[in-house]
Amino acid sequence: MKLTTLLTSAAMALGLATTAMAADKTKVGFVYVGPVGDGGWTYEHDQGRKAVVEAFGDKVETVYVENVAEGPDSERVMTQMALEGADLIFTTSFGYMDPTINVAKKFPNVRFEHATGYKTAPNVSTYSARFYEGRAVQGTIAGHMTESNIVGYIGSFPIPEVVRGINSAYIHAKKVNPDVQFKIVWAFTWFDPAKEADAAKVLIEQGADVILQHTDSTAPQAAAQTAGNVITFGQASDMSEYGPKPRVSSIIDDWAPYYIARTQAVMDGTWESAMTWDGIGAGMVGIGEISDAVPADVKEAALAMKAALADGSYHAFTGPINKQDGSAWLADGETADDGTLAGMNFFVEGIEGEIPQ
Amino acid sequence: MDLSAINPVLLIASLMVAATPILLAAIGELVVEKAGVLNLGVEGMMIIGAIGGFAITVETGSPWLGFIASAACGAVFSLLFVLLTQVAQANQVASGLALTLFGLGLSALLGQSYVGIKPPQMGKLDIPFLSDLPVIGPILFGHDPILYIGIALTAGVWALLKYSRVGLVLRAVGENHDAAHALGYKVVRIRILAIMFGGACAGLGGAYISLIRVPQWTEGMTAGVGWIALALVVFSSWKPWRALLGAYLFGGITVVQLNLQAAGVAIPVEYLAMSPYVITIIVLVILSADKSSAPAALGRNFHASR
């Protein structure tokens, strides 16, 4: 009896102590889909986390869990973070969408930020970057650079995010090279180096001399390097260790400003649910340095495209564009609205193959 | 759909690469099971070999040293299984599973600082003239040396089991350990050596994934290859050449299905993705319809006092 009382009071004291400490600091949690050392997607999110630590120093405490599987496992991790007193939780993969909404219902006082999704709640915001703008730049370079006119594309999951990227890259490759053809392999994973390497090798064997990837590891870069005359683009992170060839450029995600702003908002009590979708202009999407393996005129065309996307004078989805089945989607000069883009589930005209359902 | 885009020569060359890790692990496990021991820890030993080989290659700059280290790592790691089953007489199934789980966790810990590093590459075999032959060159003479070691190991194990005295003793231990003991053979010692050989082979197979096939280190990168190797041993009726056939079949279909996807064949991706497992099992089940059966003492512990 005495022991139980002692233990209870000790536990309570401990609980009080931690609550008191937590009150001083804003606790920010991050849920990652891959390891922080993947050199791609998760790596960049972790750079964002480090930037938050740097910006706020002692006023903030960050925690992260890596390699969290999409699905029920992620719900457990988020619940644990919320129970441990996190004030703000960033869930950084598309597949965390429903788990985030579920956990958010149970913890109305905790703020959640879900990357690349489309479901919000009073305490759930979504944020994403307009990666398709970066894909437009990649497509321009790919269209100019390919000699076999075959571009290989490693898709991860058939979700709008990925489909958008394929469409954008295709439209802009086609614009500069009418003969270009896309070969698409679905890996059904965000991160599985063995599978990604196999997919890249297969695409190269089938004649692709440009590999675009929407998976997060550097394995396709390594495969392209071994194969020789193939170019690739860094995905999510610069992957410059594979430059100047095969990696000729990259899409870099820069989450740091957003993470700092949202953490600040929680500290100030001004946080509100929002849907953020920023592109090259706002700096959320960066284009990695275009290497010397790219001829000067191609580089110029790519940079012009980047500039036009950044200042808003050009939209990556500008008509006339037909859907794959030939039906009209965008009329001449019309640009796609965000709603259609967010739920994009069709290929544009000219792409072969179907989107797995 | 454009099937002409698939180049059969490159296809065969890359299926050999895809099959080698499975083959190496399966040959090792085959010897272990022939000695009457069921070691379900193949996956764990593979991944330990994968990180061990990767780390040594990165530190020393020599892929050869890395591969030797991976075999050593696998063998040393299998000593844990030896300790549990041969010394402490623990259940082999449970010990094997423990080995796999422990291996996956330990490798993740050891590999923390090796994520995202490029390992030095092992050169490919380049025989003047032979490697340049049109069709045969890329298929037979254009690979890395470890692939040939895998095939040589298959031949070696087959010859050893079939023709040599050592092979006869090993099989005797696996069929009836009491009789072998009565004849004066050191049952436990022979089994320990077999288990260590299995560990070394699995380690090599793991390093083949992290150093040649991918090449990169990531957590859990063996992704179930060890289990496939285990299944292959059973379906190949404990015969080395059939294990080779099964491994090439599995590796082949894995590569073919990606090729079909890239060529735009109108089969749902999900069916293509499951095809390697289904087809390999069907073919090997048909093959194993003859009378060959498991080593009689498989999975049973031996102690001289009983």
Image: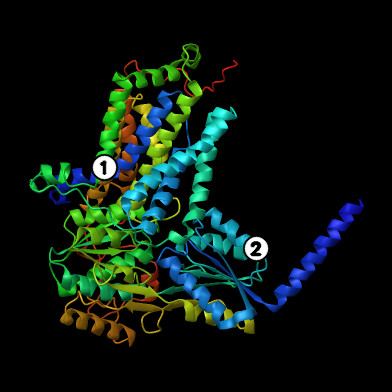
Mark 2 neighbour density, 10 Å: few (under 14) some (14–19) many (20 or more): few
Which residue does the image show at 37% across and 61% down from the upper left?
A217
Q: Secondary structure at mark 1?
A: helix
- x and y, in percent, of residue B169 in the image: 40, 18
* Helix, strand or loop under label 2: helix
Q: Quadrant of residue A174?
A: bottom left
> Which sits in the foreground, A169 or B208?
B208
Q: Which residue is mark 1?
A: B147
Q: Quadrant of the C terminus of chain B?
A: top right
Residue B280 sits in quarter: top left
Q: Amino acid at mark 2?
A: Lys
Find residue A310 and report its image quarter.
Answer: bottom left
Give x and y (percent) for residue A8: 84, 58
Q: Inspect the image, locate mark 1, and give the three-letter code of the amino acid beneath it.
A: Leu
Percent coordinates x, y for residue B76 in the rendering? 47, 40
Given residues A245 and A84, the one toward you in this image is A245
Q: What scheme was used to colour the molecule?
A: rainbow
Q: Is residue A131 above or below residue B23?
A: below
Subunit ID for the residue under disc 1 = B
Q: Same chain, marks 2 and 1?
A: no
Q: Is residue B38 visible?
A: no
Q: Residue at x 92, y 53 (%)?
A: A2
Nearer to the camera, A226 or A88: A226
Mark 2 and mark 1: Cα distance apart in space: 54 Å
Above-or-below relation of B306 to A198 = above
What residue is pinned by disc 2?
A: A106
Taking the image as shown, residue B93 lies to the left or right of residue B53, namely right
